[in-house]
Amino acid sequence: MACPHATGAAAYVKSVHRDWSPAMIMSALITTATPMSMPGNSGISQLKFGAGQLNPTKARDPGLVYDASESDYVAMLCAQG
């Protein structure tokens, strides 16, 4: 069920910032998400939760967003070998 929620949150942010790229929208959603954890630290890694619980209201004004183009991703992959 994460995909429909993330898509709706992205559409909401896009309605406010029509000139933002998909990478900028993703950056806003990820950097403003609330981290999640299991009670009692049951050994489950935070990596299994992804970015955390999305907060579309905070994502409207994240303060700083990162933009990445296709060439940025290609350069990253080439640098990894």
Image: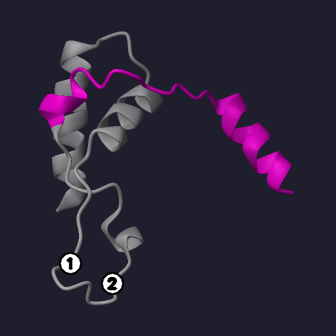
Residue reaching furthest to the front: 40
Image x and y of residue 36, in percent:
23, 64
Residue in the image at 19% along x and 37% along y: 9
Q: Check disc 2 and report its element: helix, strand or loop.
A: loop
Name the disc covering residue 44, or none.
2
Image x and y of residue 12, in percent:
16, 27
Looking at the picture, which amino acid does disc 1 mark? Met
Looking at the picture, which amino acid does disc 2 mark? Ile
Is residue 2 found left or right of 22 in the rendered image?
A: left
Is residue 34 found left or right of 44 in the rendered image?
A: left
Is residue 22 found left or right of 72 in the rendered image?
A: left
> The magenta stretch spans which residues?
56-81
Is residue 81 found left or right of 19 in the rendered image?
A: right
Do labels 2 and 1 touch, CB within 8 Å?
A: yes
Q: Which of the marked residues, 2 or 1, is nearer the chain's N terminus? A: 1
For label 2, count other residues whose C-alpha is less than 10 Å away and answer few (under 14), some (14-19) or many (20+). few
Image x and y of residue 11, in percent:
21, 29
The CA distance from mark 2 to mark 1 is 7 Å
| Residue toward you, 7 or 56 | 56
Q: Check disc 1 and report its element: helix, strand or loop.
A: loop
Residue 81, quarter of the rendered image: bottom right
Residue in the image at 52% along x and 25% along y: 67
Residue 69, quarter of the rendered image: top right
Residue in the image at 43% along x and 26% along y: 24
User: Is 20 included in the stretch rendered in magenta?
Assistant: no
Looking at the image, residue 17 lies above or below residue 5: above
Image x and y of residue 62, in percent:
30, 26
Image quarter (top left, top right, bottom left or bottom right) of the N terminus: bottom left
| Residue toward you, 44 or 75 | 44
Q: Which residue, given by chain and number where applicable, does mark 1 sit on?
A: 38
